[in-house]
Amino acid sequence: MHWTKRIAACALPLCLGVATLAIGQAASASTDKASLRDWWKNAVIMEIYPRSFQDSNGDGIGDLNGITQRLDYLKSLGVDAIWLTPIYPSPQVDFGYDISDYQGIAPEYGTMADFDKLMAEANKRHIRVIMDMVMNHSSDKHKWFLESRASKKNPYRNWYVWKDGKGQTATDKGDVPNNWRSDFGGTAWEWDATTRQYWYHKFYTEQPDFNWNNPKVHQAFKDIIAFWLKKGVAGFRFDAITTLFEDPQWRDDDPVLDKSGQPVKGPDGLVELNDTRTNNLPEVHDVMQEMRASADKGFKPSSYPGTRVFIGETYLPNIAELAKQYGTAENPEFHLPMDTQILGINKMDAVAFRAKLNDVETGIGNNVPLLVFDNHDNPRIDARYGDGVHNEDIERVLATVLLASKGTALFYFGDELGMKTTPPERKEDVKDPVGRRMWPFYKGRDGERTPMQWDDSANAGFTTGTPWLPVPPTYTTVNAKAEEGKPDSLLTWYQKLIELKKTHAAFAEGNNLMLDQDNANVLSWLRQTHDGKQVLVSCNFTADAQTVNLSGGGVKRATAKTLLKSPGGSDPASLNSVQLPPFGVWIGEVE
Ligand code: NOJ
């Protein structure tokens, strides 16, 4: 299931519903080559939406120099890498996901010199930079598409997906070639009056899909990837990667049926379709193997500070499909395909979370999971999981599942502060086109893209100008300055979890071994080093206080030393009786 289906579902009323720690590289990783190479294996990555992170020139739009100014904040938080959503030149119809030049920097974000400075300053702080790589489509203003639509004989014609209309004649454009739907609503076909054919776009009309059956497209992207690798980036997050190919027979998609066999209608009033003809076709694996082989070839790990990682935007129906995205030892694909299974749970359900963590334990071999709960396409955690009373405690629970379980953790900027989803109130204020199109059922993605809340000064310290999206009123209390150094703040909780992840061997190397598996209210698990050191994590998924018995099930002793606990929590005298406040968390080392 792609993300738009989930967000559309979530837009329905049912869903609405200390001192800075000195952490980071120096304290954690040794500088031997192997650990540098494997930096990504137990890493913490923050997704930055550059437009909303920090404005440095007063135009109301975040920029690269703004990110550079805030690197010390990221360092004190302990992040290993930042993934920047697209910063390339773009008409910004889809806020950067419509790229018009893959080897440049959007002027509103800065210059290539600003980018080089960001890289150098990030490097000084051992923070790696990961770029977004959009291979499914470009902007309709990209020179390749302008050429492609210029004439049927143009050498770039075959770089994109073109098709005659159904029943097309010399005078009549006919009907769209088939029923394929854009993820942003409506048909996926757009008529070009000059060359009299339709172009295919999985996303906005202004985002024509590349034709991945054309070897020239493959070569173009290998060159683009090499260009950025040579600049020293630490890897890529591959956008919409499962949708590169379309059914070669152009067959219609089938309708989604409800339990009684009736077609299901989406928020736009149209019958929903299973996009099996345009999503997750097997050829995507061949492309990723090819891209990976090309990227790995020129970059010997020994001569570079670490592996260049491939992260995938992989919305897939089950763990078996996710497992395939890693490829094999001989033909690797992604280092870290996103586990969006866990992202899609959308309710505080200990049983569902346990099932997903067990899936990760058993379903992807020795590969590294990349857990992700949140991003710029989904309402923030408060809107999907909050109960309106315990939101901060709930955010603490989810941060714990993210950062104290096995694998690499990816979180969205501002989650560490508990930033709230703040959707626009009036249609005329909506910036994300899909929000205008589907208003009021779905208000678009502006609500999760509001500016970073740095402090309680005007515009939350984000800009001296007029912010491109309004700063939510919560900024007076929910902001980095107010939370820094406060023992009970969410920010401190993130810092402490990240510090544990980096410094405690059980968090670095231990598997997740689920405990107390019949408990429907509390999710508990054990992490263990190869030489037997054990750490326990217990998260209360309910609004009632809970007591759990964590002894047995492989736990070696009856007592444990508290490493971290929620505000109001206590230190258990015995593992027979661990008490957790509503949505409380306890982490302890068995001794
Ligand atoms: C996924 C991105 O995360 C989203 O923001 C974008 O609109 C689509 N892909 C299309 O590129």
Image (tube, helix red, strand yellow):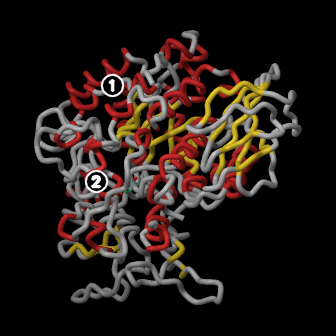
Please name the residue that numbered disc 2 is placed on. 98
Q: Is residue 102 visible?
A: no
Question: Which residue corresponds to the image point at 36% horizontal and 60% vertical from the top-left?
Answer: 209
The residue nearer to you, when weighing 419 against 313, is 419
Q: Secondary structure at mark 1?
A: helix
Please name the residue that numbered disc 1 is placed on. 71
The residue nearer to you, when weighing 83 against 394, is 394
Give above or below for 511 relative to 191.
Answer: above
Question: Which residue corresponds to the image point at 58% horizontal and 10% vertical from the top-left?
Answer: 32
C-alpha separation, residue under disc 2 versus residue under disc 1: 27 Å
Rendered image: mark on residue 19: none
The residue nearer to you, when weighing 344 against 21, is 21
User: How far across and down, in percent of the image, does residue 93 sit?
Assistant: 23, 58
Give above or below for 235 relative to 321.
Answer: above
Q: First in sequence, mark 2 or 1: give its number.
A: 1
Give above or below for 548 relative to 555.
Answer: below
Left or right: 265, with 548 as reference point: left
The residue nearer to you, when weighing 383 against 265, is 383
The crowd level at tag 1 (other Cα within 10 Å; few <14, some 14-19, many 20+) is: some
User: How far across and down, in percent of the image, does residue 554 sit?
Assistant: 87, 35
Question: Which residue corresponds to the image point at 61% horizontal and 30% vertical from the top-left?
Answer: 564
Q: Is residue 139 visible?
A: yes
User: How far across and down, in percent of the image, does residue 465 sit?
Assistant: 11, 42
Asked if disc 2 is less than 8 Å from ligand 1, the answer is: yes
Q: Secondary structure at mark 2?
A: loop
Left or right: 398, with 528 as reference point: left
Quadrant housing the C terminus: top right
